[in-house]
Amino acid sequence: MAEQRRNDNSEYVKEQNHVYARRMITTIAITLTILAVFLVTLSLLLGSRIDQIVFSILVNSELNKKCINKFLFENPTN
């Protein structure tokens, strides 16, 4: 009798773990899908603006490098 009760309890726990795992996998899949759709939509809406921002960052970083190099070579600390 006790053995049957342990087996039933073990089966119940396994079933509950399976249901929990399935629910978590479904939740994660839905969350990732929503995130992907959001990011694609954002990319399509702001595509040209993102390109402008990246280009301006690259140009500014190149200008900053040139200014720093010019300053260092023209004004030695020694």
Image (spheres, helix red, strand yellow):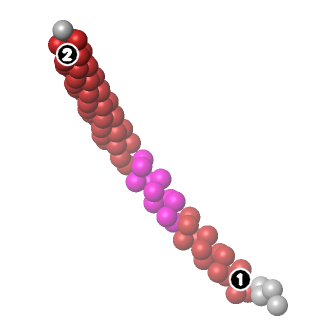
Q: Secondary structure at mark 2?
A: helix
The overriding secondary structure of the stretch rendered in magenta is helix
Viewer-side label of 2, 1: 2
Quadrant where the C terminus is found in the figure: bottom right
Quadrant where the N terminus is found in the figure: top left
**Tag 2 residue:** 3
Q: CA distance from mark 2 to mark 1?
A: 82 Å
Q: Is residue 4 left or right of residue 59?
A: left
Magenta stretch: give its range: 49-59
The percent coordinates of residue 59 (x first, y second) are 51, 66
Q: Is residue 17 left or right of residue 60?
A: left
Amino acid type at circle 1 is: Leu
Does the image show residue 62?
yes
Closer to the camera in the image, 8 or 49: 8
Q: Secondary structure at mark 1?
A: helix
For the point 50% across and 59% down, which residue is it?
A: 56
Label 2 Cα crowd, 10 Å radius (few <14 / some 14-19 / many 20+): few
Does the image show residue 23?
no
For the point 67% across and 82% down, which residue is it?
A: 70
**Tag 1 residue:** 72
The percent coordinates of residue 54 (x first, y second) are 45, 57
